[in-house]
Structure formats: C-alpha cells, structure tokens
Image (cartoon, rainbow, N blue to C red):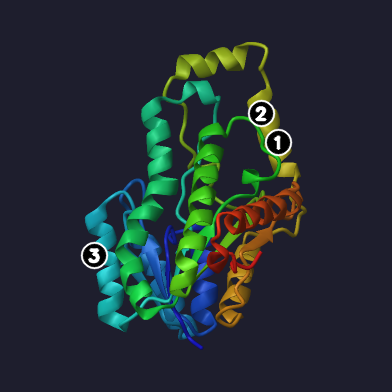
Amino acid sequence: MAQVFLITGASTGFGALAARALARSGHTVFAGMYSHDGKTKQHEDAASSFAKEHKADLRTVSLNLLDEASVASAVKQIHDQTGKLDSIVHNAGHMNFGPAEAFTPAQYLRMYDINVIGCQRLNQAALPAMRKQRSGHLIWISSSSVYGAESPMLGPYFAAKAGMDSLAHTYAHELNPWGIETTIVMPGVFTGTNHFQDAAKPGVPEVAKEYEDGPTKGMSEQTMSGTASIPPPDAHPSLVADALLELAAKPRGQKPFRVYVDPGQDGCDLVAPLVDRMGNDFYRRLGLENVTTVSL
C-alpha cells in the first residue's frame, strides 16, 4: 500500500537516495530541503527532474529543523496536500571533525540541536495527527557508533547520535500503545557521502593545532585514511535506501525495532540487541508489559 513519507535532510546523501527509491516504488515522498548556506534550488530542481523522468510522486518541502515555524509549516503542507502522514524518517544530521576539546560549548549545543532537538520539534508537530489516527511509523537514522566501535575526532557527533538513539528508544515504548511503530536504522561507515566534506570544524583552532603538533600528531590523518579503508568497495550509501524500501514493504505490526546497515561490521549488531533486550526486561519489572511488545 502506498504511504506518505517525510524525509528530513533529503537534499543529499542518505536522505536524497531514500526519497528517490521510495518515490520510485510508488510511495508519496516529501523530501525535506535545507542547506547550511541557504541554497536548495539545485536540490529541488534535481528532485523535480527525477520525479518527471520516473513518473514518481517525489515532492519537496522546505524544512529547517532548527525553526519551529518551518517545521509546523512543512507538516501542515503535507497534510493539506495528502490528508495524512504515515512515516517520518529522521535523517537530517550534521557531523564534526576534530579533537573534542577544540569544539566550543555552543558548537556542542548546535550539534544536539540538529541531531536531537530537531527530531523533537518534528515529532511535536506530526505526532498529534498520528496518535489520532492510531497509526504511523517513526524511522530514526542513528549510527552504528552508538553501540559499535568509535573512531576519534568525532566526539560531539557521536554524543549527539547517542542522544538521538536514546530518545528514539523511549519514544518507541511510549508510542507503541498508540499504534505507532518505531525503527532505528544503524548505518555504519560509508564512502561517497558529504559527511566529512561538510563536517563542522573546531571553534578553537589553537587547541586543535596543539593536538596536531603534540603526541596526537597524525591522528586526524590516520582516522580519515583508516575510515576510508573500512567499508568494502561495493558498499554504496544506497544500501540505506534499500533498507528503507524493505521497511516500507513490511506490513503494519511487523516493522523491526532495529535495522543494521553496517558494511564495516563494527559490532553494533552484537551489542545493540543485548541493550534493547535488557531495556524490555526492565519495563516488565516496572509492570509495563503492555509496552514491551516493541519488536527487538
């Protein structure tokens, strides 16, 4: 059955690939458009061209997750055009690269604002209608780093992704009785995305230089080269879009709680199920058996 999707951060990367794949398979997809430099026209035009070429229902919507008015306007536009919203893909995010100490508190706050609080703004705008219809699907694009191996120089980003994952876990149990399902997608390391290219730079460059010249000299370069060597050559970012296609095809009530798309095999798929199972067990100890039906 065709569904209405909203994908955040769909100008490029995972989001753009997923929007095209889902639209081409017959779903109505609203690709959330936002750019740090404010220039989204080229991405909107590309989406429009794809929709015409493939006769797909791919639409664009301006969506700045840092602005409540923008979020509310986007959700309203979707409901005005289609009358419903079935699935939200929390995909938008921003990366950093550099020593954790060299990023200012304001940069940390912005990292959380984009990767965590932005999800909350969208949830508050979209969930009332989903709860009213007693159906829906929240898909959170997390990171295998939450429970798998972590590399250096990405501290603020990894911390924010861990915060998002924790929030998604809580939402899953609280929304389950409302008929709203949750899936947390765990991508690993991929090449061919703009993550590193667009990554935030340290706000205290003099501290970053001390790391570059001190006993940690060469760590940044080794992290970059090592990261590039992790995924196999055929590990294309479109694997995440493929995973979302499979999710969309699963019947209601059979959506998995986590999906692993980790070509580098950093161990997330071994650790996360244990954490999730312990969480379910704790809910039972609290007497909340009715919300432990979240599929693990």
Residue 258 placement: quadrant:
bottom right
Mark 2 crowd level (few <14, some 14–19, many ≥20, 10 Å Cα): few
Residue 97 placement: quadrant:
top right
Horizontal relation, residue 259 to residue 2: left or right = right
Q: CA distance from mark 3 to mark 1?
A: 42 Å
**Nearer the camera: disc 2 or disc 3:** 3
**Outermost residue toward the bottom?**
1
Lower position in the chain sequence, tag 3 or tag 1: 3
Residue 225: assigned label: 1
Residue 221: assigned label: 2
Q: Residue at x 53, y 45 (%)?
A: 161
Q: CA distance from mark 2 to mark 3?
A: 42 Å
Above or below for 108 versus 291: above
The x and y percentages for residue 119 are 40, 54
> Identity of the amino acid at label 2?
Glu
Horizontal relation, residue 216 to residue 283: left or right = right
Q: Which residue is mark 3?
A: 73
